[in-house]
Image (cartoon, grey):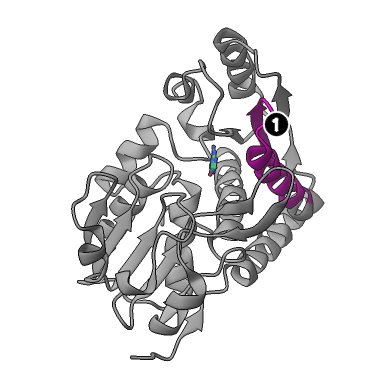
Amino acid sequence: MPVDTSILDGKGLAERIQLDLRDQITAWTAQGGRPPGLAVLMVGNNPASAAYVRHKERACAQVGIASYSQHFAEDVTFAELQEVIQRLNADARVDGILVQLPLPDPLDSTALLYEIHPDKDVDGLHPLNLGRLVRGERGLRSCTPAGVMRLLAAYDINLSGKQAVVVGRSILVGKPMALMLANANATVTLAHSHTQDLPALTRRADLLIAAVGRPQLITADWVKPGAVVIDVGISRQGDAANPGRLVGDVDFERVQPLTSWITPVPGGVGPMTVAMLLQNTVWSYSQRHKPSYNGEADS
Ligand code: GUN
């Protein structure tokens, strides 16, 4: 049954959010204030991580956030990273600290994330900020699920009482996503690699969020006609020598005609993640300086 389908334009919305942030930052710096500052810590040479970090730094430059990023060799020790984070925690120019994940073995990312001061944790991954999310309190939120919530809100997509299925239970996306949807009154199922008969479950979803990193896992027969489909996955087809196009976790061409709304890859969730990182940095700055800022960090 074909449904009248529309694209959720994350790229366009992210650009509008970034223009608003740029105007706000320009107004503060014109009054003599310092710009907000963000430190992205990257370890090793994972090409996907390097590309994400470049996007984040470019976006910072566009809106007027000062970058204090640092790149470390694969063999950097935990103690060295710990010391860098402690210095950034104490640095008054820095409002946000982000450790790009995944970290190479044997670095323990869970332990390292404890080192970031919760007020500078613009990734929303510190246990205190995750606890605030569980309790529905205001606080810094994980950027990708916050971006999904903002995108759904921008298109007035009603979540109350809807069946939402989140596929993937990562700490970066799936778990916080499920909590945000529950806080927005959706009925949430969190599916993962041990879920039995996943297609039967996803076929019941009014809102389907795919966040597993398995290219084109979700095919047309997994999707309920009229569903809203959000694709968080992003993988490159092909290999290192011949990198192909970017694809998501959803077989977009076949699934799109069934949906009422769907995000494209690229141009859907990815740009929203970056916009939420910048917004979190500006929110963190505003909490420190208390200038008038109307934005939020609590999707
Ligand atoms: N790796 C892929 N996405 C993200 C993200 O949003 N934050 C961090 N820290 N690492 C990532």
Magenta residue check for 160: no
Q: Is residue 55 above or below residue 209?
A: above
Q: Pick whichever, 110 or 127, lies toward us.
A: 110
Q: How many marks?
A: 1
> Which picture quadrant has residue 206?
bottom left
Magenta region: 34-61
- Residue 124: horizontal and vertical position, in percent? 45, 40
Ligand 1, image quadrant it occupies? top right
> Which picture quadrant has residue 50?
top right
- State whether residue 185 appears in this view: no
Q: Pick whichever, 190 or 157, lies toward us.
A: 190
Horizontal side of residue 46 vs 108, given as left or right: right
Seen at 33% across and 91% down, the residue is 1
- Quadrant containing the C terminus is bottom left
Horizontal side of residue 134 vs 176, given as left or right: left
- Residue 200: horizontal and vertical position, in percent? 20, 66
Q: Element under label 1? A: loop
- Residue 218: horizontal and vertical position, in percent? 39, 64
Q: Looking at numbered disc 1 in the image, what kind of residue is underneath it?
A: Arg
